[in-house]
Image: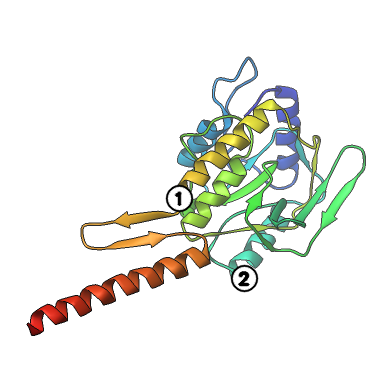
Amino acid sequence: MVTDWGEYNEMLQSFLNKGFDRTRCEYLHIDNSTGNTIEAYKGINLFLRQSKGEFIIVCHQDVLLLQDDLVKLQQKICLLEKMDANWAVCGNAGALGPNNIVYHISYPDGAFANKGSFPHRVTALDENFLVIKNSALLSVSDDLEGFHLYAVDLCLHAELNGKMCYAIDFHLLHKSRGKVDQEYLNLRRKLIQKYNSFFRTRWIQTPTTVFHLSGNWLERLLLGNAISLFFARMYNGLKKRLKR
């Protein structure tokens, strides 16, 4: 998503210098340099539909490759494939839960942030650098829009499709540490509302069966016992009527 052509071209050249040449890779972009013609969610879905490669890199325009190159990324992907062929998305920074955040990244002030052992399974990734397995057939939400938290949304889609996400130790420079502005907070609220609704406790009725879904194990246990008791009483009542 290009807003600054100078910065984009610098990023592009760093990839070309590290083995991501045009004989092996295609480069797709959306020109937002004169305004937001397409926001990130719609743009990323466009990239995911158009991309022909086995793996799709979605990254910010303000990243630069330093030491790590195409061969290093291939090695990390091969390691991930051997460990868990069911992976769908990986990146250089993510989290599994509170106080379980991992990253491998540098910043322009010389700070090198390196925490965790890799590959590390995560439930969410940072947007600065993502590698998506094309065969996983993922997308981001059509009912969300903006320029934040699409990696979280992508990881949730992967998990709902039975896939896994990982942080890997692929090192690069990110010129920005990101920002939490009002747009970020608004999109965070919308994402929470969307998935709160999706993961709410609910009854599912199909033409052939009915069942209850809940993330709360105690609720599942109590409802399961209540349903078992209900059908047991129905069965016992039916037996009594049949005896008569």
In the image as oriented, which residue stretches furthest toward the right?
110
Q: Quadrant of residue 106?
A: top right
With 108 as the anchor, is 125 left or right in this view? Answer: left
- The picture quadrant where one finds residue 30 is top right
Above or below, 52 against 240 in this view is above
Residue assigned mark 1? 137
Q: Residue furthest front?
A: 244
Q: Earlier in the sequence, mark 1 or mark 2?
A: 2
Report the residue that reaches farthest toward the top.
Answer: 34
- Marks 1 & 2, CB-CB < 8 Å contact: no
Q: Mark 1 to mark 2: distance in Å?
A: 21 Å
Instruction: Determine the secondary structure under disc 1.
Output: loop
Q: Count residues near mark 1 (Cα–Cα under 10 Å), then give few for <14, some for 14-19, many for 20+.
A: few
Q: Residue at point 67% right, 23% down?
A: 3
Circle 2 sits on which residue?
A: 83
Q: Amino acid at mark 2?
A: Met
User: Three-letter amino acid code at disc 1?
Assistant: Leu
